[in-house]
Image: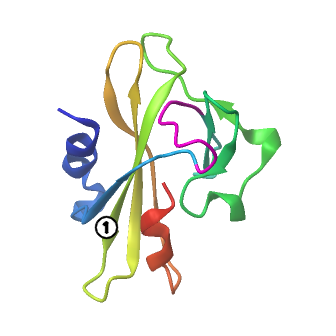
Amino acid sequence: MTLAEEIRAYQEDGYEVTHVVESVCGGCGGKKFRVQMTADQCMRRTCLACGKAEFIADSAEHWDEDDAEECECTCGGEEFAAALGSSCRPDGEVRWVSVGLECLGCGLAGVYEDWKIDYLPSRHLITQA
């Protein structure tokens, strides 16, 4: 399955994923990243081409640098393509996000983290991949 298909199939708590957006570096347009995550369900990606670090979804609001760890594939790879899946309410507001990673070494793809969005407005999160 592709990364988008893996994210759509995940459906945490039965919420259908209504949008999947590929992560693209805001600095150079790159699509290859190192990714860090924290125990508090926060993720940050760093572009392999230019080194620009950007937060995924609302992670910047809760980021704890001391708690951050590098994501690693079961093959040992630490370089990924990334995408953000969003489950939206009928009014278009985001209720759940899922972050999928695809290992650039072995191609294994899956959801690494997901979390509930319990505030409004939240539509802006759809594009914060």
Q: Position of residue 113 (x, y in %)?
A: 46, 45
Quarter holding the N terminus is top left
Q: Position of residue 52 (x, y in %)?
A: 69, 41
The boundaries of the magenta stretch are 26-34
Residue 89, quarter of the rendered image: bottom left
Tally the numbered discs. 1
Q: Position of residue 60 (x, y in %)?
A: 69, 59
**Residue drawn at (45%, 20%), measured in percent from left and top?**
73
Residue of label 1: 87
Residue 49, quarter of the rendered image: top right
In the picture, measured across the screen, residue 51 lies left or right of residue 79, that is right
Q: Determine crowd level at label 1: few under 14, some 14-19, many 20+ residues with C-alpha closer than 10 A.
A: many
Q: Position of residue 102 (x, y in %)?
A: 37, 29
Question: What is the magenta segment's predominant secondary structure?
Answer: loop
The correct choice, above or below, for 77 with respect to 103 in the image is above
Provide the secondary structure element on which disc 1 rests.
Answer: strand
Question: Amino acid under label 1?
Answer: Ser
**Residue drawn at (44%, 40%), measured in percent from left and top?**
82
The correct choice, above or below, for 75 with respect to 19 in the image is above
In the picture, measured across the screen, residue 37 lies left or right of residue 4, that is right
Does the magenta portion include 28?
yes
Is residue 122 or residue 68 the one in the foreground? Answer: 122
